[in-house]
Image (cartoon, rainbow, N blue to C red):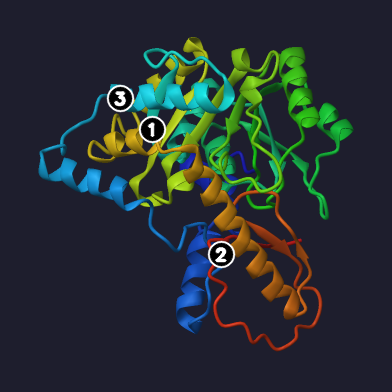
Amino acid sequence: MSNNFIPWQRTAHGANLLDSSGHPGVTIFEEITGLANKHKALNLGQGFPDTEGPNEIRQLAIEAILNGANQYAPGSGFPELRQAIATHQEHFYAMSIDPQTQVVVTTGATEAIAASLLAFLEPGDEVVTFEPYYDSYGATIGLANAIHKVVQLKAPNFKPDLDELRRTVCDNTRVILVNNPHNPTGTVLDQSVLQEIVALAHKHDCVIIADEVYEHLTFEQKHIPIAGLPGGFERTITISSAGKSFSFTGWKVGWATGPEQLITAVRTIKQFLTYSSGPAFQPAVAQALALPDSFYSEFAAALGNTGQMLAEGLEAAGIPVIRPKGTYCVSSSLSRPLKRLKVGHFGSKVSHFSTD
């Protein structure tokens, strides 16, 4: 990275949005969507669902707007939503969270990620992520003038090499940022990998940021939060959102949970980014979190089925597919000549499409 870069350029560089001359480009999501619109193509390049979230939850937001929930929400989030988040963690993962001090509501998971990184990084600190990674990781690491180190997830199983991980995490590492289930490979990390991350965080005095927005979108196994493992909670900021769990991506309601000292730091940064947002959406999300377990299992099953349909269609076109274990994502290779594809509609929420 050039020493002459100023903050916005470091941000763009971190997200791979600067060309060789230093001029900014557009994100891959904007590029793919523009091309899909131009060529009237099926857009598999952006991670938003093709169905809406539950109607009864949408109705709650409508009623809240009409009843005057249009002013600032509390900076930490509405109490009923923070309580619902704590109840959710207890119900699904047997994790006891204090809604008053260990939960902060954010403007989507992306703000939670940014606030978490900016809260702890000094210039020159190192952040370790798995690659490929969500582009906001690199952007915020660049903004903080920190150093981005990666451990590659390689096809076909997209499992990290633990020896490489041990070599990469060192005493200069300030944050290990883990996305699990993983976007865009669709892999779900084994408990042994997660436990090694916890061990490395203790050894090198790191903070773990766990981006777990796809926690309810696993197909072969239940999600294991890294904060729920022995030694995990005390060093982990866990992030999730209503966007991926309930198909309300535009509502931008996310949250971070963790020990009080870490959440206090995140909240301090967050309040000077957006302060607060979503006053009509937060109470509705609180109700969504109270939906029965069957909602989550049926949602994952339906997504898994449409993912299989997409995979079968791609394979029929001669495109090899690596079947995902979670998320919206299907990974494939376009290295071979394609057959003519005669598949009309995949009926799929599997929106990310990656080539290896």
Residue at figure coordinates x 61%, y 16% from the top left: 233
Residue 289, position as x, y percentages in the image: 41, 35
Say if 266 sits above or below 134 in the image.
above
> 207 or 124, which is in the foreground?
207
Residue 343 lies, with reference to residue 139, above or below; the image says below
Mark 2 or 1 closer to N-term?
2
Dot 3: what SS?
A: helix
Q: Which residue is mark 3?
A: 80
* Drawn side of residue 176 relative to residue 59, left or right: right
CA neighbours of label 2 inside 10 A, class few (<14), some (14 to 19), many (20+)? some
Label of residue 280 in the image: none
Residue 45 got which mark?
2
Is residue 243 visible in the rendered structure shown here?
A: yes
**Quadrant assignment, res 60:** top left
Residue type highlighted by circle 3? Glu
Tell me the SS state at disc 2: loop
Measured as percent of width and height from the top left, residue 220 is found at: 71, 46
Q: Quadrant of the C terminus?
A: bottom right
Q: CA distance from mark 2 to mark 3?
A: 35 Å
| Amino acid, disc 2 | Gly
For numbered disc 1, what is the local secondary structure?
strand
164 shown above or below 314: above
The answer to which of marks 3 and 1 sits earlier in the sequence is: 3
Q: Residue at the location (60% across, 12% down)?
A: 234
- Residue 6 location, x and y as percent? 49, 40
Cα separation between marks 2 and 1: 25 Å
The disc labelled 1 sits on which kind of residue? Thr
Residue receiving disc 1: 106
